[in-house]
Structures are given as C-alpha cells and as structure tokens.
Amino acid sequence: EAREKAKQAGADQAARAERERRAEQARAQSEPEPTPLVDTPAEMPWQPPETVGLTRALKPLGNPGNWVPQSAYPRGESPQAIEGTVAFTLYVGADGRPTTCEVTSSSGNGELDAVTCSNLMRRARFDPALENGQPVPATYSNRARWVIPK
C-alpha cells in the first residue's frame, strides 16, 4: 500500500509539472512581443552616400626618396663637407599638397635642414587622406639622409 501511494504521488507530481509546462507555453504564445525602446522604421527614409565611413590614410604619390635628391645637396660658400639626417613632418592640406614643413630632428646643420624643407615643399605630393569619403588635412613624417656627393 505504501508503494502504491508513493507511485500515485509521483504520477500526480509528473501530471502537475506537465500541466504547468503547457500553461507556460500557452502564456508565451499569447503574450505580445515587447515594445522596442527605439522605433526602427521598416525602411530608411534616405540612403547615406556610399562614401560615409570611408577612411583612408595619406598616401605619397611617387617615391618619397626622389623628393630630396642628392643633386640638391647645398653647395655653399664654405668648402666644409657636411652630412646628416633631417627628420621632418609635413602638414598636408586636403588637396594633397604640403602646407608646412617642420624639422623634428635637425641634422645639426641649418643649411641641410632648410634645403630639405625647401625641396619637400616643392616636390612632395599626396593622395589626400579621407574621412567619411571627404579629403582632409593630415601629416606625413619621414627622414632625409644627406651624404657628401662624390
């Protein structure tokens, strides 16, 4: 008899669990979808241009090594032979042309530094940087190494 009661209690518990599961399923099917916090239209009212988000770094046109050729080595009045490396930053406009040349590390010789910037301003050209598809100003940094012409 105790076994029968335990068996019946287990069957009752299983039947109750099955009824609760079915009731939960019915509630889930009848409940409306939650309202979104932000209304999202079915279609965008306008399509953004394809260039939105297009970002590209500044790109040198040609070989930057040709911008400051050894043939531009200063032939000053003093016969002293000078060598050195000039580190520079070019500030480049949205049109791809340098607007300013800044010597960031001098060669130790003002004439070499000046000739470097003079040549860069005259010869350097770039494919401009883009932000959201629009040309924007940017900077370009590099070095020019000067050796005594032979």
Image (spheres, rainbow, N blue to C red):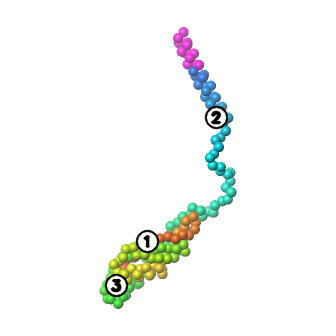
Where residue 117 appears, as percent x and y from the top left, is 43, 79
Quick one: 69 or 138, which is closer to the camera?
138
Q: Which mark is residue 28?
A: 2
Question: Residue 125 placed where, x, y %?
Answer: 50, 76
Dot placed on the residue nearer the N-terminal end, 1 or 2: 2
Mark positioned earlier in the residue sequence (2 or 3): 2
**Snapshot quadrant of residue 130:** bottom right
Q: How far apart are marks 2 and 3 (CA)?
A: 88 Å
Q: Which of marks 3 and 1 is in front?
A: 1
Residue 86 at least partly seen? yes
Quadrant of the drawing holding the N terminus:
top right
Q: Is residue 57 above or below residue 98?
A: above
**Residue 143 showing in the rendered view:** no
Residue ID at (62%, 31%): 24
Q: Which residue has dot 3 on it?
A: 150
Amino acid at dot 2: Ala
Q: What stretch is highlighted in magenta?
A: 1-12
Q: Residue 17: which disc?
A: none
Quarter residue 106 falls in: bottom left
Q: What residue would you read off at disc 1?
A: 141
Does the magenta segment cover residue 132? no
Q: Residues within 10 Å of mark 1 (few under 14, many from 20)?
A: few
Kindly report which numbered mark, 2 or 3, lies closer to the viewer in this rendering: 2
